[in-house]
Amino acid sequence: MQAELISIGTELLLGEITDTNATTIARALREIGLDLIYRTTVGDNEQRIAHAIDIALNRVDVVITSGGLGPTVDDVTREAIARATGRPLEHHPALEEQIAARLNRFGITLGENNKRQAYVPQGATPFENPVGTAPIFILETERGVIMTLPGVPREMKYLLDNILIPWLKERMGAPAVIKSYTLRTAGIGESQIDARIGDLMTLSNPTVGLAAHTGQTDIRITAKASTSDEADKMIAPIAEELQRRLGEWIYGTGNETIDEVVAKLLSQENISVAAIEVGTHGKLRERLETAARSTPGVVVHHLALDTAEDLIKKLLGPESPTETRALAETAARAIRRQYPAAYGLAVVVRPEPSNIGQKATGTALAAANEEGCWSRYFSWVNERTDAPIWATTHALALLRRVILKAEDRSG
């Protein structure tokens, strides 16, 4: 069985709220092994909602809608489903009584608008909403099943867990589970990962996919099986092969962050680090200090400066190099000696001239210890608002690899 989720609400299209309902529903479907293969968002318009439902019924077995079941004029999910399926709306007196009773508990008299909620398409099975005023319904048609949920997250979650999921599990036959396992990388680009594991990304079960974030890329392995243990057994050899191909570029799994992993490594090795950053608004200090607070024994020294000129004036002196990469290397060595610390880490983000007449941003990272210095340089046209996060993520990844002796000094 395959499913499509249709989120309904103009506020979603305008970006006024985040669609947390879609995430909750997707996770619930994954846990019972129902493949969610499409997610659609549509505004509060009866014709467009009906069109989206019609398209969904042509390509999946189960269509789940979220939102548009309230009492107001713009709540038109009921009417849209009736239009899409050619089934007129029918009044259910029992639903109206339930809605009236709930409103009475709050001292509210049933109004004409609330009575609209007691109508469902002909042939649909209605279900009372004990945590709200919007009843839901399930409509089985020759083209597929349509299931409705309210848009209020608390109500949606209750009805999803207590009505829709049990209904689906009963009709899905053999039990199934969809399980995912995430490997986390930092300091290596998405295209570089793709070049190493592209053949694995063509598998059908388990599947392997990439999710790029600022400065790092997650690798997700997803398996569908009859039990959780079977899914784990399917995932394990793929995870081992990914580890073999990517090695120390993988820094963790699940929800681990590069900050936490570096802090634990510093604590385990009983080593200190001195860091200096330029042009990152103190983001490296923020990340290191936050990680250090939750990891006893981590010693971090830090200096944050606004510009490369400040770096030269306050730490390096007039004889220092001015080229961005060399500047970061010199800074990493200097900050390590100043405190002293086992490792020096430098991040320099600065504007640079571009050969195409546009503004450019140069970023250099360097990590130094008593054995030498390792560095990297990146440049992109125009400013990046995420530069502080991107640069400090790469810097922490570089430091980790240097500590583990996994970094090629040629950078």
Image (tube, rainbow, N blue to C red):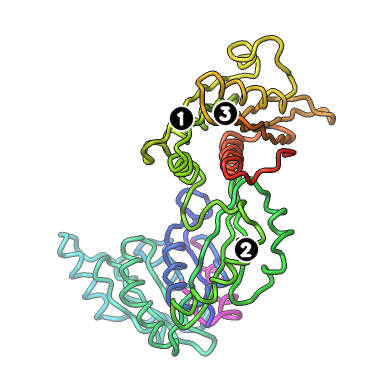
In the image, taking residue 386 as reference, residue 378 lies left or right, namely right
Query: In this orientation, which residue lies closer to the viewer: 238 or 83?
Result: 238
- Label 1 environment density (alpha carbons within 10 Å; few <14, some 14–19, many ≥20): some
Q: Name the residue located 46 percent from the left edge and 70 percent from the top edge.
A: 65
- Residue 300 badge: 1
Q: Which residue is mark 3?
A: 344
Q: Name the residue located 55 percent from the left edge and 54 percent from the top edge.
A: 184
Query: In this orientation, which residue lies closer to the viewer: 62 or 215?
Result: 215
Query: In this orientation, which residue lies closer to the viewer: 180 or 291?
Result: 291
- The picture places residue 183, in percent across and down from the top left corner, at 55, 58
Q: Which corner quadrant of the image does residue 223 belong to?
A: bottom right
Please, what secondary structure does the residue beneath circle 1 have?
strand
- Residue 242 badge: 2
The magenta segment is: 44-64
Residue 78 is one of the magenta-drawn residues: no
Q: Check the image and report above or below for 13 versus 133.
A: above
- The picture places residue 289, in percent across and down from the top left corner, at 43, 33
Q: Check the image and report above or below for 358 versus 410.
A: above
Three-letter amino acid code at the position of disc 2: Leu
Q: How far, Cα to Cα, is label 3 from label 1?
A: 10 Å
- The picture places residue 322, in percent across and down from the top left corner, at 73, 18
First in sequence: mark 3 vs mark 1: 1
Viewport quadrant of the C terminus: top right
In the image, taking residue 126 as reference, residue 391 lies left or right, namely right
- Residue 245 badge: none
The residue mark sitting in front, 3 or 2, is: 3
Three-letter amino acid code at the position of disc 1: Val
Please, what secondary structure does the residue beneath circle 3 have?
strand
First in sequence: mark 3 vs mark 2: 2
In the image, taking residue 160 as reference, residue 394 lies left or right, namely right
